[in-house]
Amino acid sequence: KAGVTQTPRYLIKTRGQQVTLSCSPISGHRSVSWYQQTPGQGLQFLFEYFSETQRNKGNFPGRFSGRQFSNSRSEMNVSTLELGDSALYLCASSRLLTDTQYFGPGTRLTVL
Amino acid sequence: GESVGLHLPTLSVQEGDNSIINCAYSNSASDYFIWYKQESGKGPQFIIDIRSNMDKRQGQRVTVLLNKTVKHLSLQIAATQPGDSAVYFCAERAGAGGTSYGKLTFGQGTILTVHP
């Protein structure tokens, strides 16, 4: 069974731009979570989706948003990029909200 | 709090030794705990998990111990190999009924280096 896939793998943007990251979960998984990983803050929860509904949200500004489609694929968007948004963005999927989360390889975002 | 642990400790062992990685968690309402391994340039990889109704769980070469009294979690790796070198993260999840249900809170991680 294929794992979690994330596209693109690498992205370079400039301050003020916006970006959209994509995540395809493992087949049959209906829950998708997003995390931001930085050297200073570690892995921090962004939000979680199940059946196209946001079930949980972390402590991030409104510039960070996401959505989930009927096929369980998910996207996250960051508007008005700041230098501090440079990070590895990780997507994880699970069958249900309470099941084990399996991570994708991440998207490395660099904001210049 | 929002994080488990504050620093990124390191553990250096010789190939063949047993390794023990420790983690202190913060939320007494957490009912599920999980260990991930992250190699450079990759996403976290699931190792083993344990629910709060258990004290110990074993996998292939790995054992997780849970002490709810002192809110402590440990990962034991038997016969550590160079391929085990990575950053290891513990994570906790709050139980049902709370607003954080489903959300994982991660520790800062421990760097494990295995010398041949």
Image: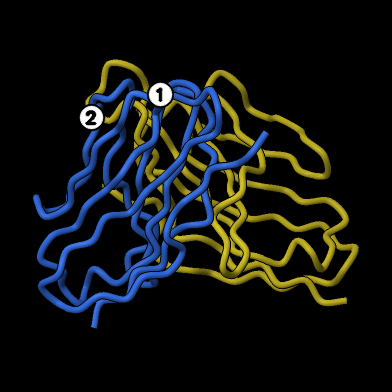
Colour chosen for chain B? yellow
Identity of the amino acid at label 2?
A: Gln
Q: Is residue A36 left or right of residue A96?
A: left
Q: Which residue is mark 1?
A: A97
| Quadrant in the picture for residue A96 | top left
Compared with A110, A94 (above or below) is: above
Q: Chain of mark 1?
A: A
Relative image position of residue A85 (x, y in whole percent): 24, 68
Colour chosen for chain A? blue
Relative image position of residue A64 (x, y in whole percent): 17, 52
Relative image position of residue A21 (x, y in whole percent): 33, 54
Q: Which residue is mark 2?
A: A54
What distance separates the C-alpha of mark 1 from that of mark 2? 11 Å
User: Of all residues shown, which one is farthest toward the bottom?
Assistant: A112
Q: Chain of mark 2?
A: A
Q: Is residue B83 left or right of residue B25?
A: right
Q: Residues within 10 Å of mark 1 (few under 14, many from 20)?
A: many
